[in-house]
Image (cartoon, grey):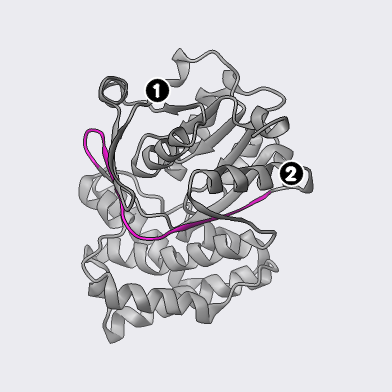
Amino acid sequence: MGGKDADLVRNVLVLGAGAMGCYFAARLIEAGTSVTLVDVDKARIDTLNAAGLTVIDDRGTRNVPVKASTADALRDVASMVIVFTKGIHTATAMQQIAHLVGPETFALTLQNGLGNAETIAATIGRDHVMFGVTDVPADLVPPAEVHSHGKGKITLWSMEEAGTPQAHMLEALFEAAGMSTRADPSTQVAVWEKVAFNAALNAPSAILECPVGGLDSVAGRAIVEAVVEETVAVAHANKVAVDPTRIMARVNHALATHREHKPSMLQDILAGRATEIDLINGAVMAAGEAIGVSTPVTTTLVHLVRAKEQFARI
């Protein structure tokens, strides 16, 4: 990359050294991009700096040297910030890197849920924020091994028209790293469709403490389908042209082929961690309330997950 493209990747920060953050960082580093992984776990940071990342994917197995750090130890202004923290930590993460944000810093969120881009924009400005979704698979095997098998893609766009050139630069950056990417003005549709998919499976699974296959019953499907219907109604009311048939096709595929998968919200409940309920089902509920669309099943699921968290004192 040259010119403005080079400026964009001069100093890339990847926030969150989980599975996705580690895998994306590794792929960008392999493509020659200057990347620093930013995390709060000092033990993980020390391990990554000492041993690098072991990457196991369809390209093979290799070790990728990485630079990892806490935010407060960094001084150079970032050219690009890619956010992979959990949505509940986005605001805190942005506060922690505020001293690394300059007038030419851009950001991309590929996080789950709604509202992350707006939270990031509070620090960086809407003209400099891009958002998107990805289904690139990644699993972290502690302390520093990341697995990714199978195909995945990235879809992204800018919050405002002013950021369109940078969206296309990011598309080129990820493509150069061998990651299928599309800069698409209809990315908001993909975001909402992923939210509908996650809302339908995550919350019921977390409440029932069952894997995805546990929802494949008459009663389970009634809940799942109701959540999809409510999310679609809220999206359409907000002029986002989601496709309910496409969403249900993904849901049915998961129910049929990922029966033993434990959604992240269930994993959080079982591990005693706070969930992303407010960024997924809770965000749908709030968006519905704001525009006058009723979401009774979604709302009930939100209250049940919150009650479950409070009972466990998470």
Q: Is residue 78 above or below residue 161?
A: above
Q: Quadrant of residue 222?
A: bottom left
x, y percent for residue 211 = 23, 66
Which amino acid is tagged 1?
Lys
Residue 156 visible, this angle: yes
Within 10 angstroms of label 1, few (less than 14), some, or many (20 or more) residues? some
Question: Where residue 144 sits in the image (x, y, percent)?
Answer: 25, 34
Q: Quadrant of the N terminus?
A: top right
Distance in Å between CA atoms under marks 1 and 2: 28 Å
| Disc 2 element | helix
- Residue 276 placed where, x, y %? 41, 50
128 to 70, vertically: above or below:
below
Q: Main secondary structure of the magenta part?
A: strand
Q: Secondary structure at mark 1?
A: strand
The residue to which callout 1 is attached is: 67
Q: Assess whether residue 42 is covered by the magenta stretch.
A: no
Specify the amino acid type for callout 2: Pro
Give, as a single range, the part of the protein colored magenta: 141-158
Q: Which mark is residue 267?
A: none
- Residue 120: image quadrant is top right
Which numbered disc flags the more N-terminal residue, 1 or 2?
1
Residue at 60 percent of width and 60 percent of height: 287
| Nearest the eye: 61 or 213 | 61
Residue 165 is tagged as 2
Residue at x 67%, y 46% (from the top left corner): 167
The quarter of the picture where the C terminus appears is top left
Across and down, in percent, residue 174 comes to 54, 45
Above or below, 39 against 136 in this view is: above
Q: Nearer the viewer, residue 279 or 166?
A: 166
Q: Is residue 149 left or right of residue 136?
A: left
How many discs appear?
2
Kindly give the residue lying farthest to the bottom in the view shown. 218
